[in-house]
Image (cartoon, helix red, strand yellow):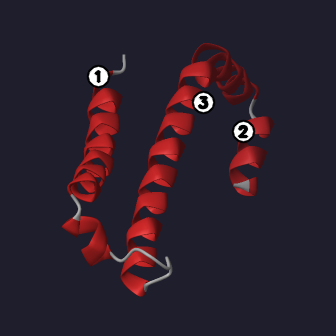
Amino acid sequence: MEEFDKKLTANESFQDLDDEIKENYLEIVTRFYLLFESIHKYILDLNRFVLDLEEGLYIQQTLESVFDLEEGKQLMVSMKLQVKVHCIRTEKIK
């Protein structure tokens, strides 16, 4: 990254182009980054929750006991569906 920065600052036309790109696209790039970061965090948290259930971290719940309850099944499906909704919404952003 440091080498890239050196090349960028050494050439004035590159610097101008870099400034123009930042001015025109920084906001949308930042929005996409934050969106992908939030989706990634949600997936990591979901995976951690399932692993914690499998490992018996919760005193009164296991993965099997969650799936034994109708609400537990709905919760697991809803969490998985939420990931798909985020991905679909990401595709439709212009």
Quadrant in the rendering for residue 63: bottom left
Q: Which mark is residue 30?
A: 3
The amino acid beneath tag 2 is Leu
Q: Position of residue 15 (x, y in %)?
A: 73, 27
**What residue sits 78% from the left and 47% below the top?**
6
In the image, 21 versus 63, the foreground residue is: 63
Q: Position of residue 64 (x, y in %)?
A: 25, 76
Q: Closer to us: mark 3 or mark 2?
A: 3
- Determine which quarter of the picture holds residue 28: top right
- Give the residue displayed 38% in from the left and 70% down from the top: 50
Which structural element holds mark 1? Answer: helix
Q: Return the disc, 2 or 1, that comes first in the chain's sequence.
A: 2
Residue with the mark numbered 2 = 8
Camera-side residue of 8 and 73: 73
Depth check: give the residue in front, 82 or 26: 82
Labels 1 and 3: the sequence-earlier one? 3
| Residue behind mark 1 | 92
Callout in the foreground (2, 1): 1
Q: Is residue 72 above or below residue 51?
A: above
